[in-house]
Image (cartoon, grey):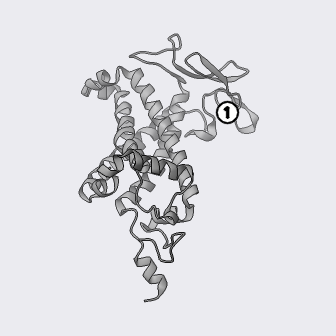
Amino acid sequence: MDATQDMTQNVAKRHRLSTRLWHWLNAFVATILLMSGLMIFNAHPHLYWGDFGSREDYAWLQIDDTRTTGFVRIGSVRVETTGVLGLSLGTNDKVRRVAFPGWATIPTGYDLAAARRWHFAFAWAFALGLTAFMLVSLFNGHIRKDLHVRRAEWSFSAIWTDIKNHARLRLGQKYGLSNYNIIQKFSYIGVIFLLLPLLILTGITMSPAMNAAWPWLLDLFGGRQSARSLHFIAAFLLALFVVAHLIMVLLSGPINGIRSMFTGRPMAVQKPDQGGPLP
């Protein structure tokens, strides 16, 4: 056996098959849901708390225009966003008076009915995919072995060490960090078991048919408009998580990170102070 084969066999498997399949499926599905959701939001770019909401009611968030400028208002704070949000240029330099520009939405032109069809169709894939991933992760040990926060990791020193590693950009396989660290575990647990279920449940709460079947959801989230606001906030947090995730992948070595998400194993590399492959 040559040295290359020996190093490959000694590289620990980083991502299980179920994780890799769900990761790429979810990346595609979540993108479609986000873009179609932004088109749905364009139909009424205001968010409220409670059961009801109309243009005459006070909205805690508003993305709109004054015909000459676009703006975003959160509470009493208002920021001009002309050219980006509220008022932007579309194809052929035509002014579009919508909250989100066409390049960020599905469809690119205003079409609420089509956006809802896209959103509802892919919402099923999103919900069923998450359920399947949770069940498989429970039975194959992914939750217990990879995401479980062990007692030693709850210590302040362990958490502080991981924070310092991130601040110093000591990330990835080349520093011997082949397992999920505590920040990754907290992030993945929060997204998988809190944020994604919140997106699904608040989405269900906005459906009149589901309100009739499960009226307790309206009480749980404080009304349909509150559920809509929470749905938007959860989608925004998910988008932030994706951006942070991509930044971490770039900083820790994008080739190795992407390769491990396709094959399950990163390339065999050496620690800075040792000559052998990482365990």
Does the image show residue 261?
yes
Q: Residue furthest bottom?
A: 1
Amino acid beneath label 1: Val
In the image, farthest residue toward the right? 93
Quadrant in the picture for residue 65 = top right
Q: Is 101 left, or right, of 272 in this rendering? A: right
Residue at image location 37% in from the left, 31% down from the top: 202
Query: Camera-side residue: 164 or 72?
Result: 164
Please tell me whether residue 157 is drawn above or below residue 120 in the rendered image: below
In this figure, which residue is indicated by the disc labeled 1?
84
Spot occupied by residue 35 in the image (x, y as percentages of width and height)? 53, 40
Q: Residue at x 49, y 43 (%)?
A: 241
Label 1 secondary element: loop
Crowd class of label 1 (few under 14; some 14 to 19; many from 20; radius 10 Å):
some
Coordinates of residue 19 in the picture (x, y in percent): 38, 57
Which residue of the protein is positioned furthest toward the front in this rendering? 157
Q: Nearer the viewer, residue 66 or 145?
A: 145
Identify the image quadrant of the N terminus: bottom left
Q: Residue 123's x, y, as percent?
A: 40, 41
**At x 49% / y 14%, what residue is drawn?**
54
Task: Point out residue 263 in the picture as x, y percentages from the top left corner.
Answer: 44, 68
Up/down of 59 relative to 108, above or below: above
Give the total number of marks visible in the rendering.
1
Q: Can residue 148 be seen?
A: no
The image quarter containing residue 77 is: top right
Q: Quadrant of the C terminus?
A: bottom left
